[in-house]
Image (cartoon, rainbow, N blue to C red):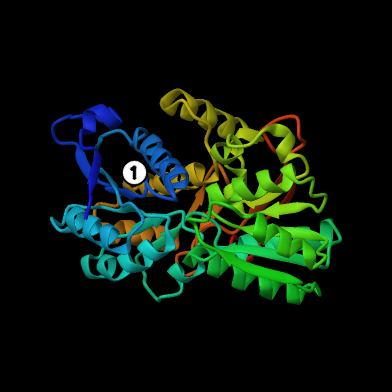
């Protein structure tokens, strides 16, 4: 198993204080920065690193970043190595659903909270009290996705293209259920592998079913490929994609004109602005990483900030951090976070659309507190 340590130096990576007597918290970052989820995983890592730079006074940060690749075995091995010494206060855990599901039993065994931005619904359906998801799960985002298609665009004949990963299967199940609830008929559906190099055959078959909208639930690379091929063939049917499309790194793979009329669901869009806090976060992210932030970075930033707030307020152990996350409320930059009892912390979503002139989308619709958990 190939394991890449990206950073071990607290001083170099976080600039943390080394003051004698300071409380030390150990927050390993175990995320995929290579493989088909590298764009999303890099954003997750960066959001965590940026948050850990802002540790409370008197707190010293210990944090190593490990590339988990895309295999469940690599993620489990990385977690065992990170928490086996018993010093971890919390873990930033892979957003890849198959990896996270494999990590959950070990988190329960070692009693350490996993803080993630995975969208796979099943990760919080295992009855595990140690998982905390700071990105809205499919129960939230896919409701926003389907409602925008039906209620705002007035479309009733979607063609659904989804990834064959756990993430894709989860989104497909929720979208299908939501469309049925809204009275829309899915006229075509197909799952595609992450290794697919040509999606034109899928696009052609989907269009043959005479849909009035193309609905995507794909990872970043396949999303960009589908949108590019649709634009190249002059497809006039609107595209409403999953959260991968909102990422600046995905949009960067396309020309602005190829994005015209494309919309996507997501938790937030930092590059679209909206508040002084988000604009400050975006500026700080650009300065630190020379890149544009996305909702995965912002969600992971907010999640780690909630961990740090718990430490600031007196949490000294992994169990105390778990209790603070499970019972507390956190005013993050993207939204207000609170657990639903299962570890789902994020309950809002937005829809963004591109105008064909810029790679920066505009927020066109907000779906606040979809689950009704935040009081």
The residue positioned 64% from the left and 54% from the top of the image is 349
Residue at 35% from the left image edge and 49% from the top image edge? 31
Q: Residue at x 57, y 34 (%)?
A: 278
Question: Quick check: can you spot residue 267?
Answer: no
Q: Note whether 72 is above or below 3 in the view shown.
A: below
Q: Nearer the viewer, residue 37 or 153?
A: 37
- Quarter occupied by the C terminus: bottom right
| x, y percent for residue 35 | 39, 49
From the image, tell me which residue sits under label 1.
312
Report the side of 35 relative to 57 (left or right): right
Image quadrant of residue 269? top right
Quarter holding the N terminus is: bottom left
Q: Position of residue 311 (x, y in %)?
A: 32, 47
Left or right position of 330 against 257: left
In the depicted structure, whether residue 156 falls above or below residue 196:
below
Image-based side of 29 in relation to 198, left or right: left
Where is residue 14? Give x, y as percent.
Answer: 29, 31
Binning the other alpha carbons within 10 Å of mark 1 as few (below 14), some (14 to 19) or many (20 upward) gives some
Against 172, is 132 above or below?
above
Farthest right residue? Answer: 154
Q: Nearer the viewer, residue 357 or 309?
A: 357
Kindly identify the residue that appears in the image at 73 percent across and 64 percent down: 206
The image shows residue 225 at horizontal and vertical percentages of 60, 47
Q: How many marks?
A: 1
């Amino acid at each position: 198993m190939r394991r890449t340590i990206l950073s071990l130096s607290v001083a170099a990576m976080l600039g943390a204080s080394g003051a004698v007597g300071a409380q030390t918290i150990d927050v390993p970052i175990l995320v995929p920065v290579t493989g088909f989820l590298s764009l999303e995983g890099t954003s997750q890592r960066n959001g965590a690193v940026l948050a850990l730079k802002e540790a409370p006074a008197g707190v010293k940060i210990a944090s190593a970043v490990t590339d988990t690749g895309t295999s469940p075995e690599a993620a489990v091995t990385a977690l065992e190595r990170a928490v086996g010494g018993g010093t971890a206060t919390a873990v930033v855990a892979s957003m890849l659903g198959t990896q996270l599901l494999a990590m959950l039993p070990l988190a329960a065994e070692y009693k350490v909270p996993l803080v993630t931005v995975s969208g796979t619904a099943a990760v919080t359906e295992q009855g595990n009290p140690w998982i905390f998801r700071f990105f809205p799960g499919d129960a939230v985002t896919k409701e926003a996705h389907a409602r925008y298609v039906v209620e705002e665009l007035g479309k009733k004949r979607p063609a659904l293209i989804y990834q064959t990963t756990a993430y894709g299967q989860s989104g497909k199940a929720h979208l299908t259920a939501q469309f049925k609830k809204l009275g829309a008929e899915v006229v075509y559906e197909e799952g595609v592998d992450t290794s697919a190099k040509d999606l034109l055959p899928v696009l052609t078959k989907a269009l043959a079913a005479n849909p009035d909208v193309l609905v995507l639930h794909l990872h970043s690379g396949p999303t960009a490929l589908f949108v590019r091929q649709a634009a190249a063939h002059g497809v006039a049917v609107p595209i409403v994609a999953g959260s991968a499309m909102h990422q600046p790194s995905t949009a960067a793979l396309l020309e602005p004109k190829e994005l015209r009329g494309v919309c996507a669901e997501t938790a937030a869009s930092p590059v679209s602005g909206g508040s002084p806090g988000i604009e400050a976060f975006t500026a700080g992210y650009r300065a630190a990483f020379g890149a544009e932030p996305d909702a995965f970075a912002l969600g992971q930033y907010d999640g780690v900030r909630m961990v740090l707030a718990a430490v600031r307020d007196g949490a000294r152990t992994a169990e105390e951090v778990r209790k603070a996350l499970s019972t507390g409320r956190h005013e993050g930059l993207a939204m207000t976070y609170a657990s639903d009892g299962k570890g789902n912390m994020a309950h809002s979503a937005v829809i963004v659309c591109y105008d064909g002139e810029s790679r920066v989308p505009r927020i066109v619709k907000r779906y606040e507190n979809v689950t009704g958990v935040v009081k």
